[in-house]
Amino acid sequence: MPTAAAWRGVGDAMAVGRSFEVLVDLTLDAQDAETVAHFEQTLARAEEVVELRRLFGSPDYFVRVAVADLAAYEAFLSQYVMTIPRVRGITSHFTLKNVKPAP
């Protein structure tokens, strides 16, 4: 069950004009401790990141991003993700319809 802080983070994102949500699969070029730590610390600091999960298998990470619109998402990619060394693959998923939202 998500914590109150987790719910507040999602609600706060929507309240401040971040209703455009993107689900992102990210793959790194390497899995050494320095690369992983730098990647995780950089994305964890980004206020646009609502959720960040490290996965087994492929892709390496699942990221849920909340921004104002497509232009804001492009800026997020350019300012955060594309500046992180050793990011090999980025796949963005845009929701057509939320059939069963999280509680």
Image (cartoon, rainbow, N blue to C red):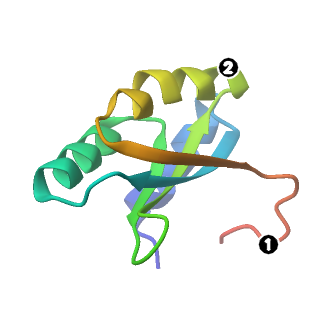
Cα distance between the residues tagged 2 and 1: 27 Å
Quick one: label 2 or label 1, which is nearer the N terminus?
A: 2
Instruction: Give, as a three-letter code, the residue at label 1.
Output: Lys
Crowd band around label 1 with a 10 angstrom C-alpha radius: few (<14), some (14–19), many (20+): few
Quarter of the image with the C terminus in it? bottom right
Can you tell which mark lies on residue 100?
A: 1
- Identify the residue shown where x is 71% and y is 27%: 70
Which residue appears at 17% of the width and 51% of the height?
A: 37
Is 40 in front, or is 51? 40
Left or right of 50 on screen, residue 30: left
Q: Disc 2 marks which residue? A: 71
**Which residue is at 60% across, 24% downward?**
74
Which label belongs to residue 25? none
Kind of residue sitting beneath label 2: Ala
Q: Nearer the viewer, residue 43 or 78?
A: 78
**Up-down: is 5 above or below 83?**
below
Q: Is residue 87 visible?
A: yes
Q: Are marks 2 and 1 in contact (CB under 8 Å)?
A: no
Side of 86 where 95 appears, left or right: right
Q: Position of residue 14 (x, y in %)?
A: 63, 40
Between disc 2 and disc 1, the foreground one is: 2
Residue 8 is left or right of residue 72, and the answer is: left
Task: Please tell me whether residue 80 is drawn above or below residue 29 in the rendered image.
Answer: above
Q: Secondary structure at mark 2?
A: helix
Estimate the x, y position of residue 30 in percent, counting from the top left.
Answer: 27, 55
